Amino acid sequence: MKGGGGGKEVPAEGEVSSKQRPKRKCLQWHPLLSKKKALDFSEEEEEEDEEELEKVSLESPEHSSQTPECVAMEDDGEEDSSEQRARRPMNAFLLFCKRHRSLVRQEHPRLDNRGATKILADWWAVLEPSEKQKYTDMAKEYKDAFMKANPGYKWCPATSKPVKSPTHAVSNVRKKTWSVPSNNTKDIPVAKKVPKTDSTPQLNFAMADPTKMGGLSMLLLAGEHALTAREISSSNSQSGVADVAKHTGKSALFQLAEISSCPPQLVEGCKNSECRSAAAPQTEVCGLSQPNSPDLPSSCMQSPLFQLAEISSSDSQVSISEVKQCGQSALFQLAEMCLASEAEKLEALSSQPAMDSSSLCAQDSAPNTTPTMDLPTLTSASSSPTSCKKKKKKPSDVSKGEKSPGSPKKPCKKRSSSSSDLESLTYTIEAVAKGAWGSEEMENTRKRARPSGSPVLQPSTAEKKKTKLKVKKQLRTKEEEEEKGEGEDCKTLEAEGSLLIHEAELKFECKDEADVKVDSTEDSEPHTSTAQQSKSVEPASPLPSKGEERELEAKPVLMQTEEKEIEPKPEACGSRKSERSCKGALYKTLVSEGMLTSLRANVDRGKRGSMRGTMSESEIGWTDESCNFSQPAASNPKKLKKSKSKEEPVPGNLGKLEEEFEKKFNSLPQFSPLTFDKKSTAVTKRKKANVAHPLENPTSNKGPSPSQKKTLFHKIVSKYKNKKEKAGTLDKAVAQPDPTASDTGTAKADSSSASLSTETRKTGDVPVGSQKRKARKSKITHLVRTADGRLSPAEADKVKELTQDQDGKPLTHETLCNTESCSTDPGPAETDSLPAFFSLAALAEVAAMENMHRGQRAVAIAAEGQVKDMAPQTPVLISCADQ
DNA sequence: CAGAATGAAAG
DNA sequence: CTTTCATTCTG
């Protein structure tokens, strides 16, 4: 266990199943996002304001300070020594590559990565500006977050580069790189720390994971409450207290996360967790807490976890009761923050986690009936994690089954019996508080917290937020449907955040309206959810999702769209069902999102891995994928399946991190290969049918106007096509952008293109010849932009180049289209017309070029005619093209 | 480990 | 301007 070896082994295992590489990837990937980082990330992204980062920073100190051993395994290394060097954030293109590479690979199974990269580059070039924008934004976000996390990060380490050069170093570094650099903490002075309590309207993605989300959300919510409370209580103490609290809070979460995440290295994980918990909580917490009561809460939280960990690890029974209490208290606190409902969850968490884990592990699980079960289970969970992936259903079943039995002992029972959760909660809380801390201090804190935390107080805030959220939601919805606004990256995040908030709100509402009555179903749900959350740790594999689904029974498969989920929630909130549904929905949402992302990623990978073998299906695969991609949410179910098959990659930790990252990722639009394919070709023939509908929903279109324009463009194209009769060159390009508008057209185009494409380029052509950095994109853009009306020689050259390089690739088309769209409306202003025309002209040129290649000049001419219609100047362009 | 791509940053 | 490095993964 302990040895480092163990740690490594774990990953290997996971990977092994699918591939070696994947593992690495995972690791790398994770590392980047690495939990800590992820946290930061989320925070940043979600709210730029918040500075929860500090928490991280706080955390790190703890770790570093103590538990050298433990640390060593995971974080320490990073934190302490090396972590300095984080991996630089990916740029837009890289993001794009990452996201689409799999697709490319599928398309061209044989192609090696380099080729794939080339293709990707082509695609990238083709991408619409808007599309790119998203990636760019994300990259930027990423970067910003990264920078925040690592204030003093330098892209170029100095030549020597401490970290990376060495292989091992690299691996290590990578893993942790992003993680929270101790430096950061240090660097970033705590300055921020306290700041915000604001609630965080959007929290999001940082917590992508269900667990985290819950935790985070709670944290956030609590944060305010707690802070307030703390402040009050701690008023005497320094502001530092707040920090501490945060710290502790975070650490606790972190620990949980770790534990959960630890799966890969069961033993190690346990150890780590233990170590950490021990180190942090005890030392810090204890120390802090002891001195002043103010911190108690935090300490409590940690302690419980810690204890659990310890217990699990040591098996020693320790004082379970205490633990429970602590856990409860901690949980309770959280719950308070969040709400009673959450409290329940928490309790469940404390107790259930084990269950889940056990169920997950399936191993012995045998959750013992003994009271201690929790602990043991936990242990098992931590240990089993590795194998965790496996089971899906079990968790739910087990959890349910077990729960009832288990409930007896622990607080869990509440849920079953819980006539009124609130009461029970309160009771529990009180009991816990007393038991755990009899001190008045605690009470005070608690009181404060409670009041604040209690529905009454919060609601106001919540409501406000709510409204906001709602608005946002609405907007978002609109956007999605209409696509009106350019999709902001944040959207997703916001959405998530909103979800969280909603959760909170819902909870509040629910409580207010009706106490939480627990129906049998409810019980199961909450538990499950809890379990899941706790599990969150786990990789988000399919299980969770399944569990969620089941839970949601009431609401069958709403999960698909976030929006849907969200909407329902609010409404649902009102009634019990709603409550349930709310929770379920929330969980679902969270999980689904998280899961989705993870799943998706997994799927991709897995697909790739497996798919390769069977490429013949490329079509199908594409379709599916495209669909999935297009609708992330919707795809959940599918993903689950897939993911299940291949989830390996994500152990617990990674899952979380990945999720976060992935989320963002997901938010990024994925273009269906088809779109590109058209251009590139390759499979095409069959696809056409599939292709018909636009794949990319997610991003959907960037702007409304574009779509229209596109339509226009499309029309033109279609005409062009018709004239051409099947030339289809242009078509390819167009397809992607317009989802709805040009379906028919697209389809046709596809078919036509297919024939062409096949002929023209078989593979895609990889050979674009971009070995050097072409700057096509820039050039193109340039070209487009230049709206003098005329092409400057250079431009012309560029154009030629493009055409040649691309072999008549459609790429340009899209770009052009976009530009065109931008300029749009020829009618409006003459000036505008010019640009538009320009783009058209460019298009025409391209087409012409292609045609020429093919020897179909006539077509080109025809095209010209059309273009001409559009813009009088066409002729000139044409002439250029001819040249 | 090289290498294909692009982008961002640093020198 | 040039170099470095981020990601991915085959050969």
Image (cartoon, coloured by chain):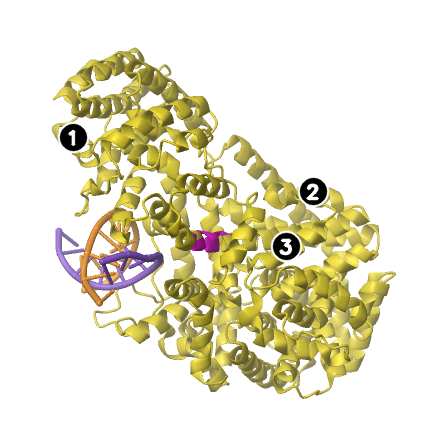
Chain colours: A yellow, B orange, C purple
The residues colored magenta run: A600-606
Question: Residue B8 versus residue A177: which sits nearer the camera?
Answer: A177
Mark nearer the viewer, 3 or 2: 3
Do discs 3 and 2 share a chain? yes
Q: Which residue is mark 2?
A: A568
Q: Which residue is mark 3?
A: A546
Q: Are marks 3 and 2 in contact (CB under 8 Å)?
A: no
Query: 10 Å neighbourhood of mark 2: few (<14), some, or many (≥20)?
Result: some
The x and y percentages for residue A192 are: 50, 66
Q: Are marks 1 and 3 in contact (CB under 8 Å)?
A: no
- Kindly identify the residue that appears in the image at 47 percent across and 86 percent down: A69
Do discs 1 and 2 share a chain? yes
Please, what is the three-letter code of the amino acid marked with disc 1? Lys
Q: Which residue is mark 1?
A: A800
A515 in magenta? no
Query: 10 Å neighbourhood of mark 3: few (<14), some, or many (≥20)?
Result: many
Q: Is residue A639 left or right of residue A720?
A: right
